[in-house]
Amino acid sequence: MNELFLKIINMSISASGLVLVVLILRFVLKKAPKWVNILLWGIVAIRLICPFSFESALSLIPSAETFPEKVISGPSFDVQTGITPVDNRINDYLGDRYFEGVTVPANNGNNIMTILTIVWTIGILLLVAYTVISYWRLRRKVDTAVRYKDNIFQSENVKSPFVLGIIKPRIYLPFNMNGQDLEHVVAHEQAHIHRKDHWWKPFGFLLLTIHWFNPLVWLAYVLLCRDIELACDEKVIKELGNEQRADYTQALVACSVNRRMIAACPLAFGEVGVKDRVKSVMNYKKPAFWGVVLAVIVCVFVAVCFLTNPVTKNNGTDGTVTEWFDYLETPDEMVWDGRLEINLPEFPGVTFRWYPEKMEAVTEEGIVPLFHGMPIWNTYFCDLTGDRIPDLCSTYTFGSGIIDSRIIIYDYANGASYELSDRGYFDFTLRFNEADGYLYVDKTKYNTDELVETGRLVFKNNSIQIEGFSNEAHQVFRAEILEIHDGHYLVKPVEGSWELNSADRIVVPISNAHPSPEPEIGNVIEIEYSGEILESYPAQIADVYGIKLIRKAETWDLIPMVMVNGTLYLDTGHESTIEARCGVMDGEITSQVDGSKQPTVDDQSNFGTGYGYQYGATEGTIELFMNGKWWIFATEEARQAILFPSTENEPSKFYLTIGSEGVKSIKLSMPNSSGGFENADGSLLKKGERIWLENLDGYTDLRGLTITALGENGEIIWTASIPDEEENKGFTHLVNDDWEITNIE
């Protein structure tokens, strides 16, 4: 729904300029036939309702998408009005002040758009309700109308003549009309029906209902209603003499009414602009033939220029490349103490001046530095940014200690520059390809002649890009996901990544992501991108060619716990010493949640089901019967208060969580001991079930333990080994897709 409203907003903005043009043309073409105005409003209607259009070089619409879709998806915000100075000022201002998750709340654009969409929908519903109620009330008024003849009816409840109905329109007249007025009124209303005005006026109101938030659309609807009446008057009076016209104006005055509210219906004879209509009737002159032709030509021109979208800005050179100088092929020819100058017709009064170490623009106001190099190797002029004004495209070297080759695009018309570099990793050089007339970029390994790839220089998403670079050569880095938003990840590059030197927070669009598994916060992902990081905070990556999950975040399971009668009991790690007990269970664990979650409903655990329990002798405890033993679970308060027997001389206790299906038994082996586990009834172990690993001949940790899961036929399902290393002494936590081992302490 948000996307639909955003589309409506852009359509409304595109049509607003056309409304202003029609307002001007109504004045310029005031001597033209009035039906010309209706044609012009029809063009506005098409612009308001048609969601698509063709591109044309003749289009005078500045932009068909003033607010791009990223307004919703974020994280940044920019407008594309098509007027470059306006765009630059607005976007430069917002660039440092609007960034979701940093300067504004995360998902801010989508939230605001949702609110606006709700308001828009409410407005539509109110207007629809107003229309339905108005129509219903009007129908009730004329329920008692009597037929005069054909589709003409008279009613005592009617104050002014009007047409009502879409499929079978009827003309309604008041009873008290004299014969002369009645003749003119009927002719007028029949002209409405003949011209299908009883369709066009409700259609106009429908567009007003959709675009109710645009004041220019309200103005357009009011003027449409007025122009419909003027055109209908003109159709009726063009065959009348002066005396008959006077009678017609008298009928207009006699039937005039004051209507303070606009509506979709009816088409009332005297409800709109009576004073202007009287003047129009009395001053009517048959339009000249050439005037009509000129008016039609104007309508065609307006349709071509305002119903088509502007040609999408060129995302690469248009084939017109002007070489100024290029010393890359012949570096010996560079004059290190010289200079070059050039003038372009697109920049009157500006001289571009090159020195090996700098580029500057010389004007009447003085010298303006553009960029520096050591040296600047070549410069070409071409319209790379798509504003039909040439940009300076140069290769230069720069740096201290690490001196690398870079490409800079300097948009002199707008005072903006864009750079392509990867210091210490790759060099970039610019060259002109005479075969197709485009500029190309050669990417080589840093400080070598080893060509990595080559491709055409283009400009997309407000950054330099290389068209045709192979996927194998895209830059790749790994990063940890810090936040996940609608449309992008916020990540931190892992230690050792070059990208970490550029920024410790990077916004990565969620595009071209591997379909499964879906990354989560804390996961490490591998990002394949163009190598270009946009300077902001957090930094941004414009083009992402691939995202895949490398490592899931380590999930630390919670301590085993159960929920009984609304109370949460936690595992104490101690076995009950009660020997004499009732053989009847107080309850049974019937459901479970993941080991990393806390139980939330009664008789639920985070480690398995089917275990019976009894309330413990100590307040705040229950005892679960698992694997032939009774284990004490206690509330957090009870765990802190109860003094359990010392375990200093006891071996540490660990539990194994089964993470796969089909396991019948577990085989354990250590350097000096072995053991195993299986259900007494021979049933398969349940996924998520936990098995305590203890009493392995006095071992205090699990170093050197090998665990083998066997299936029904003795086949190996999986094997886990804990290396006999110092780091595995004491507390142990190892995770795999099929198993997990954790010290219960």
Image: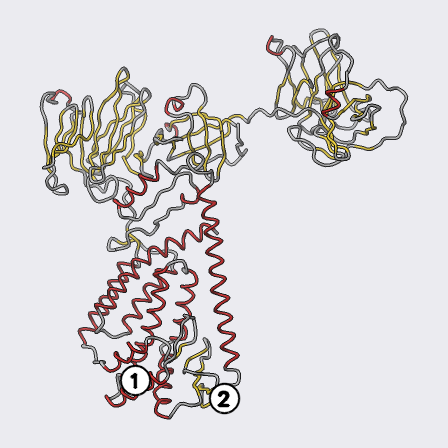
Q: Position of residue 487 (x, y in %)?
A: 46, 39
Other-residue count near label 2 (Cα within 10 Å), few / some / many at <14 / 14–19 / ≥20: some
Residue 512 in view, yes or no: no
Q: Which mark is residue 723?
A: none
Q: Going from the N terminus, do you reach mark 2 or mark 1 first?
A: 2
Q: Position of residue 179 (x, y in %)?
A: 37, 93
> Considering only vertical position in the picture, is 119 above or below 159?
above
Q: Secondary structure at mark 1?
A: helix
Mark 2 — residue? Answer: 146
Q: In whole angstroms, how far apart are the C-alphas of marks 2 and 1?
A: 27 Å
Q: Looking at this rendering, what residue extends furthest in the bottom direction?
A: 179
Residue drawn at (28%, 76%) of the image:
276
Q: Nearer the viewer, residue 137 or 694?
A: 137
- The quadrant in which the C terminus is found is top right
Q: Quadrant of residue 205?
A: bottom left
Mark 1 — residue? Answer: 249
Q: Position of residue 448 (x, y in %)?
A: 28, 18
Q: Quadrant of residue 256?
A: bottom left
Which-is-in-front pick, marks 2 and 1?
Answer: 1
> Considering only vertical position in the picture, is 434 above or below 422?
below
Residue drawn at (41%, 60%) of the image:
212
Q: Nearer the viewer, residue 146 or 724?
A: 146
Q: Secondary structure at mark 2?
A: strand
In this rendering, would 555 be left or right of 708?
left
> Considering only vertical position in the picture, is 372 above or below 87?
above
Say which amino acid is labelled 1: Thr
